[in-house]
Amino acid sequence: MIVYIARRLLAALPTLWAVLTLVFVLVRIVPGDPAIAILGDRATPAAVAALQAKLGLDRPIWAQYVDFMAQSAQGDFGTSMVTNRPILADVSAVIPHTIDLTIAAMLIGIIVGVPAGVWAALHRNRWIDVLARLVSLVGLSFPVFVSGIFLLLAFALHWRIFPVIGNANLSDPGDRLLKLVLPAATLGLVMAAYITRVTRSAMLGVLGEDYMRTARAKGVPWRRVVWRHGLRNAGMPVVTVVGLYVGILIGNSVLTEIVFNRPGLGKIIVGALNQRDYTMLQGLMVIYCFLIVVVNLITDLTYGFIDPRVKQA
Amino acid sequence: MKALLRNPTTLAGALLCLLIAAGAVLAPWIAPHDPIEQSILERLQPPGGDFLLGSDVFGRDVLSRILWGARISLVVAVVSIALAILVGGAIGMVSGYIGGRTDMLIMQVMDVLLSFPSLILGLIVVALLGAEMGNLIFAIALTAVAPFARIARAPVLSLKERAFVEAGRALGFSHLRILVVHILPNILDEILVMGSLWMATAVRTEASLSFIGLGVKPPTATWGGMMREGFEAILDAPWLSVFPGIAILMLVLGLNMVGDGLRDATDPKLTGT
């Protein structure tokens, strides 16, 4: 197992390097000088030069690149050029909110999506199946800010069941949970829609397999055949989708955080964009990349857990 | 075309899209009011009466703005996905056709693009380049290039080994001719199905960026921008965010239904799944 993890980690390194390079290039192809962007058009040349020196922008591009890579490798994501605070400090302050939201949304997606997909597959082409397909198609057509605003209008403004503002007090579990419900439902429903569809088609592929018939023939109850033999074999594509979806989830959390006024990575990124905080943007993108590489790694490890054959490959 | 009529999902989706496209094209003639002209005396009128879907904080007619906004959504989605298909498809086909190290390198770069959350990538690109229609199209196309490259490459890998390609080469056809005349028709179906599904994503991304404030600048009517303005007045005038929201949902759903039905129809393996 340890060898497997180590090998996966090594395989992730080139991707990480490539993504970091992309980030470096993206931030640097911006038209205009960041120093002028911060100080304004009327800044004296001396002030601009001083800021450039402070940000390291006066150094050759390859030196900036080497520095950037060395710092990223050490987990140093730099400091915000607007607030002068370390980026990692700002991010760690809000990361619990983002993690809460992501995990809750994934749980909702799995708890709703997997049974719905299995159920639809078992009733193929009956009205339950048609309904599940239609509802899931509508679900994944909703841009999250639209579903978020609709949920907000219904459950926070009309029926007043849940609070409008999502800035939870982390030390109060009740408050934390209450303010998580609507944002998590917003993200979770889209995820449930994806999972339903993938589970359904994966299950359909597995239902006709010989081992399913054999298990049934040797007297295993059908329910157990479906959940133990069927779902376990249909699990791989589902895990792949959950893993891939985390990237979308991270993107969508930006919108959810705006609608529900929740602190989180998304709100920081929008703030940094508005203030043209380039170092912050660069640091945030690096953090996003790390997150995604970690998620991909967890996805790979889950494959090994579901299907022991993967580990030997 | 036959597939369109056979599958009820595709048919319903196509009708939905056509309806919205008709609204967009005919906007100058059928919109009851000017989408931009402000009329402070008539601000925040609830739906009904002179303003069928209500009026916004500047007294502009919501229905007229939705009709005009459809133009932005459709143009951005169609142009950006056409661009992504052209560039991504070409990259994928050529990469698969060449094969070897070059192919591996190109696909590695595509994987890197793919591993970035598309909304975040779009957000950053538009924020850095400026919120204009051209940049918006470029950003959305950029997020969709990698998937099309992948889709176009996979079948080429096996097609290039087939006898008809070899025959073409033996006859002295140029690589370009083989790719365009002999290989392209074989992968076109799949690319078009992906295209309609990605157009749905493009509509959603454009609306999302406009909602964040990175869309085509006001006072131009965009659905995402209308939601943004409506969201600020959500307590006084919920209709301002509800109706554009429904419009976005309808278009995305319509495109998804078309793509979903087409996928079932073009892939005999998946019939009924």
Image: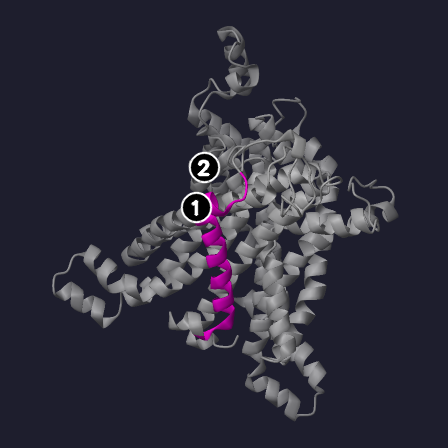
Q: How is the image coloured?
A: one colour
Q: Is residue A287 visible?
A: no
Relative to A279, B142 lies left or right: left
Residue at horizontal 70%, vertical 32%?
A90
Residue B102 percent location from the top left of the image: 32, 50
- Tell me whether the residue at label 1 lies in contact with that at label 2, contact meaning CB atoms closer than 8 angstroms: yes
Tell me the kind of residue under disc 1: Val
Residue B83 percent location from the top left of the image: 37, 47
> Which residue is label 2 attached to?
B133
Instruction: For mark 1, give the secondary structure.
Output: helix
Give the quarter of the figure containing the N terminus of chain A. bottom right
Residue B251 percent location from the top left of the image: 53, 55
Instruction: For mark 2, give the secondary structure.
Output: helix
* Magenta stretch bounds: B6-33
> Which residue is label 1 attached to?
B75
> Observer-nearest residue: B264 or B43?
B43
The chain under label 1 reads B
